[in-house]
Amino acid sequence: MLELQNLCFQVSDDSAGQKEIIRDINLTFEDHAFIAITGPNGGGKSTLAKLIMGIEQPTCGKIIYNGTDITHKNITERANLGISFAFQQPVRFKGIKVRDLVSLAAGKPKDGRSAVKFPDICDYLSKVGLCARDYVNREVDASLSGGELKRIEIASIIARNTPLAVFDEPEAGIDLWSFHNLIQVFDDMHRESNTSLIIISHQERILNIADEIVVIADGNVQARGQKKDILPELLKGTEGCKFFQQEK
């Protein structure tokens, strides 16, 4: 489904000239996969997610999605091809209500009818632990907390139901109760839909429900494998703490 070929990304650095953030990454993600990407802060994980979505453009290499070279396609083009993205810090939309955002994400039904039904919107919100009647008519603005915005963003991605969804540290800003609910949301998405998941995370419980774990450090792939092989190494003593943060 998704293939990263010799991917690299550099930025200008006043002291060092060009600084490599991503170095020669080669990864293939199969259909209906659940991949957790982890590693130390500053290792390049979020940059890699932005390269996949088209928020950043690679310095070299290719990104192939379902056989199509999307390396130079923009965010909108990639979204239209079936890629969803959840920001670490969700975007606020002043003047747009929650019901409109979720409805827009869901799009038109296949039979061509114009609107997503209200009960469906409520269902998407309830899946992320929000009481629909308290949120559907609220604006997606500064009146919502970071955790509320994060859950609304995830509800929108569930509504989109695209073949590929990329989440950048979805646990950020989420309270403990909501985090437990979030784990179930991802597990359900993986089991009940055809969506492939790529989740950037430090959290053990997210890594533990993934099919595979990829460790990114110093801009490159340090390890990749099934959770039974990778997770014990990440949890091993102080050395593992460089790659992994325990739940609070």
Image (cartoon, helix red, strand yellow):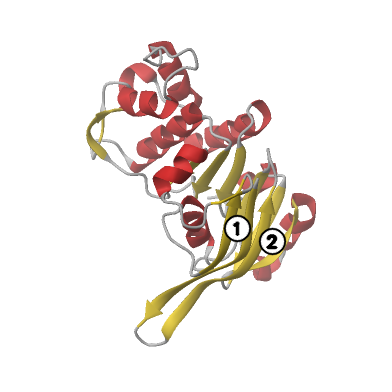
Location of residue 234 (image quadrant): bottom right
Above-or-below relation of 2 to 103:
below
> Pointer 1: what residue?
38
Q: Earlier in the sequence, mark 1 or mark 2?
A: 1
Element at label 1? strand
Above-or-below relation of 53 to 209:
below
Badge 1 vs badge 2, beta-carbon distance below 8 Å: yes
Location of residue 244 (image quadrant): bottom right
In the current view of this chain or complex, which residue is farthest to the front?
Answer: 68
Q: Position of residue 210 (x, y in %)?
A: 68, 44
Q: Position of residue 66 (x, y in %)?
A: 63, 44
Say left or right for 133 vs 112: left
Indicate the amino acid at tag 1.
Answer: Thr
Task: Give the CA distance from mark 1 to mark 2.
Answer: 10 Å
> Pointer 2: what residue?
234
Say left or right for 165 vs 141: right
Q: Position of residue 12 (x, y in %)?
A: 38, 78
